[in-house]
Image (cartoon, rainbow, N blue to C red):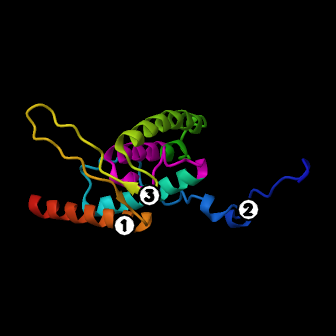
Amino acid sequence: MSYDTQPDLQMPLDELQVPHSERFDVGSDFAEALGPVNWNLLTADEAYAEWHDLDKWVKWLRKTYGLPPTILPPFWHRHDELIWELSALHLHWRASYDSEAPPSAPCMWHRDFAEARSRLREWVSLCGTRLDRDRPTRQTAWPGEPPISAEPERVIANRVEDFELFVLEDIAARRRLQRRVG
């Protein structure tokens, strides 16, 4: 392409030859108002939507930035510390790329993303999740509490199946809680 030639900016995204795996449909993300996601307070239906929205974004983030499993492991959904960090980062990204955001917002997001990668790297090393296996984050009992036994690693052959099973279990637990509360 010569410097004299300008790309057709009105061309549909599909015609720009951007690989599908590298696209992220932000249209649905911006349909509802932005607000913090408190995973502790979500209803079953809200959680189902949030899990899938976050998972879609995390997959996009991993591929777009080439993040290794030492920063963004496949079983992030099994670790609260990773869920909260990624959820906050996702919300920050959405706000930064909103049409009403200031022009400098994406730069702020990238600065915060650099800090978040450091935290993610530390938490991944502490929680023990790996590319093909996972174990619950180890907890330490405080004085006066019963000892907490460490659970062994388990191999997980299919990340997508594991995620869907995890979400279904989470939704079922939330529904049971909703029925008890009222």
In front: 104, or 128?
A: 128
Q: Amino acid at mark 2?
A: Leu
> Marks 2 and 1, how far apart in space?
32 Å
Q: Is residue 131 magenta?
A: no
With respect to residue 142, does 53 lie above or below? below
Is 31 left or right of 106, judged from the image as shown?
Answer: left
Q: Which residue is mark 2?
A: 16
Question: Whole-percent x and y of residue 79?
Answer: 33, 49
N-term mark: 2 or 1:
2
* Residue designated by label 3: 132
Kindly check if marks 3 and 2 are in contact, taking CB atoms under 8 A apart as contact: no
Span of residues in magenta = 64-92
Secondary structure predominantly adopted by residues drawn in magenta: helix
Q: Residue at x 22, y 66 (%)?
A: 172
Residue 112 position within the rendered picture, expressed as x and y whole percent measured from the top left? 50, 34
Amino acid carrying label 3: it is: Asp
Q: Residue at x 37, y 58 (%)?
A: 51
Q: Secondary structure at mark 3?
A: loop
Where is the C terminus found, in terms of image quarters? bottom left
